[in-house]
Amino acid sequence: MDYRCDHGSKGSSRQASDWRSATVAFAYTTLLIVASSVRMVQAADPDPLQDFCVADMSSHAPNVNGFPCKDRAKVTSKDFLYTGMRQAGNASSSVTNAVGQIVDVYLYPALNTLGISHVRLDFDIGGVLPPHTHPFATETLFVVKGTVYTGFISFDNILYAETLQEGDVYIFPKGSLHFQLNVGNGPAVTFNSLNSQNPGFLTAVNQLLVTKIPEKVLETSIGINAKTLKLVQDSVPLYFGGSR
Ligand code: MN
């Protein structure tokens, strides 16, 4: 049977109706794509309008996004050099036996407007960098030394994790919860890169248990009584500041 016969005498008006529906659907789809593109653009560091803009951290000029530029005539090659990651962090000084040096625009003003920052992580044996997020950046981790078990939780709550050897790289999508554990027999070192000059650093356990969220909210959310909650809160290490 010829399918065109199904249109019958009403074929032309139905075709017009179909065409209107298709046009509306196309318009909606276009709108959604544009809307999601705008959201993605807003979520990333903006593109710079010049090759560099070494931050003038002493300036009191108002800034909207990033810092004002240092006078270009006073910029030298030394402005682009950062040597602070030569030294190992003192992992044993941390209650989790791991420390990180976040080399963002505040430590390294040359990063200003360039959408990148770095981290050096140092771990003692068994050291842990607790589950945390960077709201403004995707991160890659490169194992310089040792053996590191690391992973992230996807937005549909799946754990993706691997044991990395020296030279291996792992990636943590922007905003995802991730962690590191030194599973080797000696110290470990990683060098990480993040695609924001100011990626942000939020530790999940501290956010949940060492802030001032009302106890009733936590008791109900976690499903424990007040006594158990207090026990858990008192045992959480204050690894990155905070107070009880
Ligand atoms: Mn991280």
Image (cartoon, rainbow, N blue to C red):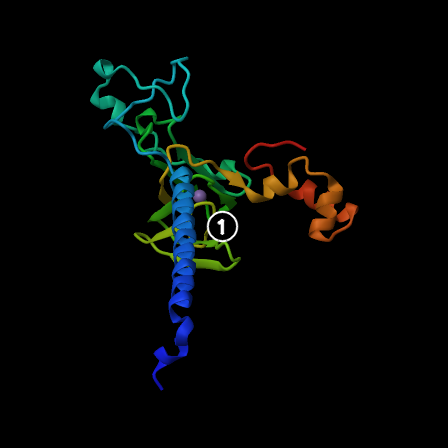
Residue projecting furthest to the front: 9
Above or below 74: residue 175: below
Is residue 241 among the parts visible in the rendering?
Answer: yes
Q: Residue at x 74, y 41 (%)?
A: 215
For label 1, being within 8 Å of ligand 1 is answered no
Q: Quadrant of residue 191?
A: top left
Residue projecting furthest to the bottom: 1
Q: Please state if 51 lies on the left or on the right of 90 as rendered.
A: left
Percent from the top left, x then y, of residue 112?
Answer: 33, 27
Percent from the top left, x then y, of residue 141?
Answer: 37, 47
- Specify the quadrant that holds the N terminus: bottom left
Q: Residue at x 68, y 35 (%)?
A: 212
Is residue 187 among the parts visible in the rendering?
Answer: no
Mark 1: amino acid: Gly
Q: Quadrant of residue 50?
A: top left
Instruction: Name the residue tied to disc 1.
Output: 126
Q: Please state if 233 lies on the left or on the right of 151 as rendered.
A: right
Q: How many marks?
A: 1
In this rendered view, identify the residue nearer to me: 69 or 144.
69
Q: Residue at x 51, y 35 (%)?
A: 93
Percent from the top left, x then y, of residue 32?
Answer: 43, 50
Q: Residue at x 26, y 22 (%)?
A: 79
- Specify the quadrant that holds the C terminus: top right
Determine the secondary structure under disc 1.
loop
Mark 1, other Cα within 10 Å: few <14 / some 14–19 / many ≥20? some
Percent from the top left, x then y, of residue 124?
Answer: 46, 45
Ligand 1 quadrant in view: top left
